[in-house]
Image (cartoon, helix red, strand yellow):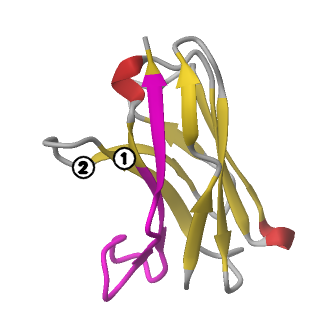
Amino acid sequence: VNLVESGGGLVQAGGSLRLSCAAAGRIFSITMAWFRQAPGKQREWVATITNNFKTTYADSVQGRFTISRNNAANTVYLEMNSLKPEDSALYYCAANEYGLGYEPPFGSRGQGTQVVVSS
């Protein structure tokens, strides 16, 4: 499934952003996730939402970020509050289409949207 993220930008510490991930196909049966990668750092898993709307979060974002989905709109969201400079990264969503992971060829990922949090 083709994924396109949007909503990134520059925000001051303590601020909020809402990222969107629009899928070209139907995602109602697919577990979706958000990842992020900062320059010089490894990719970090951020949050997951299953097809049954169960959510899990990385400790680093627990209580500040909320993942949600609108299956009718084939869209997944990441609401980010109380942002910190260390949240700055390229954020991208991914689809675990076959239950075999998020990386191609079994899964899909978008190109990402940049988030910069200034101190």
The residue identified by callout 1 is 36
The disc label shown at residue 18, or none: none
Q: Secondary structure at mark 2?
A: loop
Label 2 – label 1 distance at C-alpha? 6 Å
Q: Which residue is mark 2?
A: 43
**The N terminus - image quarter:** bottom right
Is 84 on the left-hand or right-hand side of 6? Answer: left
Asked whether residue 57 appears in the rendered view, the answer is: yes
Q: Are marks 2 and 1 in contact (CB under 8 Å)?
A: yes
* Residue range of the region highlighted in magenta in the rendering: 91-117
Check the image and name the residue furthest to the right.
Answer: 72
Viewer-proximal residue among 82 and 52: 82
Q: Reply above or below: 7 against 119.
A: below
Q: Could you tell me how many numbered marks the image carries?
A: 2
Do we see residue 59 in this rendering?
no
The percent position of residue 14, horizontal first and vertical second, equals: 58, 11
Is 13 placed above or below 72 here? above
Question: Label 1 crowding class (10 Å Cα cut-off): few <14, some 14-19, many 20+?
Answer: many
Q: Residues within 10 Å of mark 2 (few under 14, many from 20)?
A: some
Q: Reading the chain from its start, which is encountered first: label 2 or label 1?
A: 1
Question: At 62% from the left edge and 57% from the top edge, which residue is drawn?
Answer: 6
From the image, which quarter does the C terminus lie in?
top left
- Quadrant in the rendering for residue 46: top left
Q: As shown in the figure, which amino acid type bears the numbered disc 2?
A: Arg
In which quarter of the view is residue 29 placed? bottom right
Q: Is residue 27 magenta?
A: no
